[in-house]
Amino acid sequence: MTNAIEISGLTKRYGPVVAVHGLSLTVSCGETFGLLGPNGAGKTTTVECIEGVRRPDGGSIRVLGIDAVRYPQQVKARIGVQLQATSLPPLITPREALELFASFYPNHRPAASLLGWAGLAEQADRPYERLSGGQKQRLALALALVNDPELVILDEPTAGLDAHARNELHELIKQFRDEGRTVLLTTHYIEEAEKLCDRVAILHRGRLIACGHPAELIREVGAQHSVELTVRGPTVERLAIPEGCRLVVRSQPRADRLRLKLLTESLSRAITELVQQLPPGSEIESLHVRSATLEEAFLKLTDDINADRTAAETSSNAPVGQNRIPADTGTP
């Protein structure tokens, strides 16, 4: 078995609203896969169909080789899930919660080992209501591992946490990958997906608009790196803009000083060409580079989709006799 999850043509409706529209994707065993998109993109509905919490209206889902639509109980026995919001009785302790969840499975991990793994040994007997937000999320992750699952599904695991608690959870999620588990992560924190995921699928209005490694998506959409360079020396005004770069700022406050800001799709080539043509006797006073990010790729992809949708809707209202582009009425 090479794929942990195989989805084909998944569709889910809530009345007239199509939350997921013909989604197809695969998640390989052992990879950390991110479902990325804004609120309302269909991420949670997708994972709820995978988990067997919701029944899809169309399409097929196979999880660990099992037909998840026909045999959801078999799937639930082999996966671990952290829901978007976890609610436990206010007075239950982490130890009691882990022991309770362990009793649901014939094979399970000891509560003590999970408490240590999640960094909750000192809070093991503290009431749930007295745990911090980060501690509650770490407990939710520990509960997702009670049955020693092959696949772990995390739905917005760091939503609402401060930066310190978010970083703690990131380290625990990385441990899932190091243990060889498959991780399916939904998030609207784009930097989180870029940091944690081997591949990401970008959802928009229930549709898949892109899928691949974050670096691949950045290249495909042409998201650009920036280079800011200040050079001092004789004849620096002759410095030429490398091929493939777009000039944003060129200023020369003094005869012997030149400041450039460029945008480029090839950061290494731009820097190499700039340095190679520096006049003799000149020196670099400052060099600042900023790599293109998944966020820029995400914004470009979704902006393009929104622009196409607006154009289609505008065209659909055109007077009779004018060319029309059919509007996508199946997407909420």
Image (cartoon, rainbow, N blue to C red):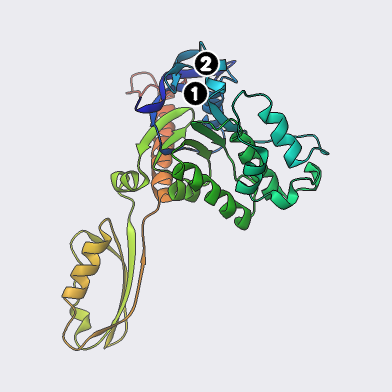
Q: Find residue 126 and report its horizontal and vertical position in percent.
A: 79, 46
Q: Is residue 129 rendered to the left or right of residue 42? A: right
Q: Mark 2–mark 1 contact, CB under 8 Å?
A: yes
Going by the picture, which residue comes out furthest to the top?
Answer: 70
Q: Which label was assigned to residue 56?
A: 2
Q: Is residue 322 rendered to the left or right of residue 74? A: left
Quadrant where the N terminus sits is top left
Residue type marked 1? Val
From mark 2 to mark 1, how far is it between C-alphas? 9 Å
Name the mark nearer the viewer: 2 or 1: 2
Q: Find residue 179 and report its horizontal and vertical position in percent.
A: 46, 42
Observer-nearest of 234 and 179: 179
Snapshot quadrant of residue 90: top right
Secondary structure, mark 2, is loop
Q: Find residue 45 and report its horizontal and vertical position in percent.
A: 55, 26
73 lies above or below 275: above
270 lies above or below 35: below
Q: Find residue 33 and report its horizontal and vertical position in percent.
A: 43, 37
Q: Which label was assigned to residue 20?
A: 1
Observer-nearest of 71 and 220: 71
Question: Residue at position x 18%, y 72% from top?
Answer: 240
Snapshot quadrant of residue 229: bottom left
Q: Is residue 205 rendered to the left or right of residue 239? A: right
Snapshot quadrant of residue 103: top right
Q: Earlier in the sequence, mark 2 or mark 1?
A: 1
